[in-house]
Amino acid sequence: MIKEMLIPIKNCKLYAKLVGKNNGKPTIIMESGYGDYSKAWDSVIAEISMLSNVLIYDRAGLGKSEPSPNSRTSSEMVKELKALLIKAKIEPPYILVGHSFGGVNLRLYATEYPNEVCGLILVDSTPEDYIERLLPTMTKEFQQAYNKQFVYEGNYDEFMESLKQLKESKRQLDVPLVVLSAGKKAHYSEKSQMLWNEMQKEISKTSSKGQFLIAENSTHYIQNDKPEVVVNAIKALVDNI
């Protein structure tokens, strides 16, 4: 089954696609990284859709979705995702899968609506203290490039506000949580890579049921470099629910 939708929420319309089979398992919700849209999951969507219904969507202003007048912070994006799920009549519970900045949004969703989430998979997601702890270990050139990238959806201040929102949220979870860490990030020194893995491991401890895995030899887009790692993590969660 493939169902494409343009869902009207409060101030805009969001593009979403529902694929897969309704086999009584929870719907899998996929959230892309900063500036990315639903095509970021093309490498794994066919296999994941064999496990259950899967919803991929474009955040406001990206892909086929209309821009939103609301601020581009995680809390606003979580509200928009919630509105999308209600309008599309996609019932909880959900398994949430977030890549990079998408992981920030979905961690916030899981703390905001804990009764709706039965599993969370974070694919090399952004730690809330990335700017303070990890960015200073990178080269000046990397830091400058990093700070200049915020032109696609939220600006730098909105991105910082999103990390602050995550810090201030009630973070301890009680759902199965799988944290996948890229083991070979581009432009990372050995020291930075070790720190990145350590910070990812810390995220796994935000749930009483956390699990931490390193995708060896994978860059930031684990779903492209090591798609089987992402698929297997989702499959293990689906099988145990």
Image: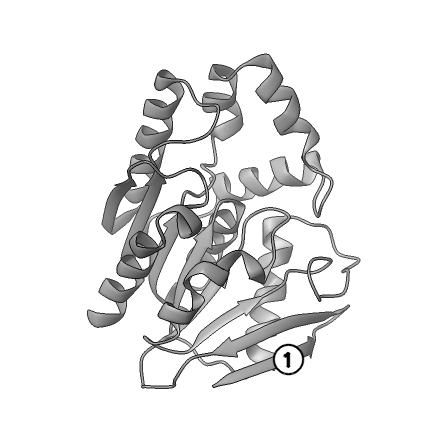
Which structural element holds mark 1? strand
Q: Residue at x 41, y 52 (%)?
A: 223
Above-or-below relation of 27 to 42: below
Q: Nearer the viewer, residue 125 or 176?
A: 125
Amino acid found under the numbered disc labelled 1: Met
Q: Which residue is mark 1?
A: 5
Q: Nearer the viewer, residue 114 or 43?
A: 43
Q: Residue at x 44, y 67 (%)?
A: 45
Of the 4 image quadrants, the one containing the C terminus is bottom left
- The mark tally for this picture is 1
Q: Position of residue 93 (x, y in %)?
A: 38, 74
Above-or-below relation of 217 to 176: above
Q: Residue at x 45, y 64 (%)?
A: 113
Q: Nearer the viewer, residue 100 or 159?
A: 100
Q: Position of residue 29 (x, y in %)?
A: 46, 67
Q: Position of residue 221 (x, y in %)?
A: 45, 45
Above-or-below relation of 212 to 119: above
Residue 241 visible, this orientation:
no
Residue 212 visible, this orientation:
yes
Q: Nearer the viewer, residue 78 or 137?
A: 137
Crowdedness of circle 1 by 10 Å Cα count: few (<14), some, many (20+)? some
Q: Residue at x 22, y 63 (%)?
A: 236
